[in-house]
Image: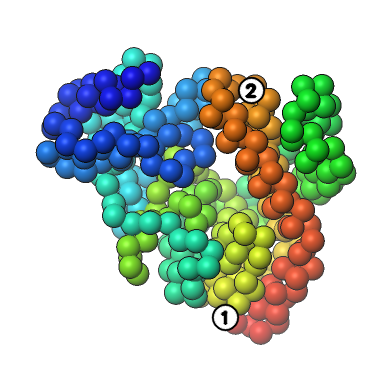
Amino acid sequence: MDIYLFFNKIVQQLDLGMIIDGPEEVVGGLTHKMFRVFTDKGRYIVKMLNPNIMKNSTSFDDCDKAEFYEELLKQNDIKAIYSCVFNNKKMQEIEGQYFYVYEWYDGKTLKDEEITSYHCKEMAKAVAKIHNIDLVNQEFNDKEKNIDFEYYINLCKKKNSPIYELLYDKLDLLNNSMKKGNVAIKKLPSYFSICHNDMDTKNVLWLGNDYRIIDLECLGYYNPYVELYELALCWSGYEGCNINFDLFKTFFKTYFDNINLDMNIDWESIYYANNGRLEWLEFNIKRSLMIDCDTKEEQEMGLNEVKKTIDHLVYYDKVKDEILSAISELCGSKMR
């Protein structure tokens, strides 16, 4: 694809003006490609949806649902970057390439060492506000994970893939995580709510003390306890395999100060239910093996993400007792 020719078609079709700067790819997207383009009418970011993902039979339904939930967040004044509407549609298409357009925001993502208690408090309040939009006291049935990691490990060996060395001795860890997670999801507290489902540090842009949440295409109903727990980890250093438990506790306390949920639950089940990284690992194993992937660039991204994800899974297993102990301290303090 000639990206310059394609973006000229975008601005013409959507009447965005004449291009004066760009298009330029923005670093950060792990599944879709992001480009900034400035015109004489405005400044925009364009998300080019991964063609291989859009081949999935459920992708368009998932996008339709996320767009509906996005409007609910907008109506409730959640600070986010919302997709622009053209011809009564959010998702656009040219020559089989699907994309979204957003207004540019001059913010940046934070590195782990830049995150303070202020950021954790703001994010915890934002998560609670999203969950409060439609917090339902009712059982939420999640699907069990059934990933054949042994098959993928053998395939890596057969194809002489560099990720074989990362995976071959991790089979027990992966299968135990999956097995215990499948048991744990049946023990989760009976609540569900609208969740962002990917609101980690890479998906929030900061401009001073202000922020905007991005990447809303994963919006959907899920268990609020699991999302709270996952985000408290992410915003306290888990991504760098170095949790700051003061920040972790700050996130937890602020969340429960802003929502009517009981904190005294079975947190060990939450620990095991938080195993969505297994699906992310499978997705990237497939990319690294050129399964559902057709570019060397995407393959390389898959290789890098497999390494990161394995590091996270090993670290997560190592710090289980510390995580549960920190939550136990908060419960014992009757913080609410």
Labels 2 and 1: the sequence-earlier one: 2
Residue 315 visible somewhere in the drawing = yes
Relative depth, front residue between 188 and 46:
46
Quadrant where the N terminus lies? top left
Label 1 element class: loop
Q: Is 147 situated above or below 98?
A: below
Q: Is 169 situated above or below 19?
A: below
The residue carrying pointer 2 sits among few (fewer than 14), some (14 to 19) or many (20 or more) residues within 10 Å by Cα, namely some
- The residue pinned by badge 2 equals 290
> How far across and how far down the image is residue 182, in percent?
77, 44
Q: Amino acid at mark 1?
A: Arg
Relative depth, front residue between 327 and 242:
242
Residue 40, quarter of picture = top left
Nearer the observer: mark 2 or 1; the answer is 2
Residue at 80% over, 43% down: 174
Q: Is residue 73 left or right of residue 228?
A: left
Q: Name, please, the residue furthest toward the top.
A: 95
Residue at 40% over, 49% down: 214
Q: Name, please, the residue furthest toward the bottom.
A: 333
The residue carrying pointer 1 sits among few (fewer than 14), some (14 to 19) or many (20 or more) residues within 10 Å by Cα, namely few
> How far across and how far down the image is residue 65, in percent?
44, 36
Q: Amino acid at mark 2?
A: Met
- The residue pinned by badge 1 equals 336
Residue at 33% over, 57% down: 107
Relative depth, front residue between 166 and 90:
166
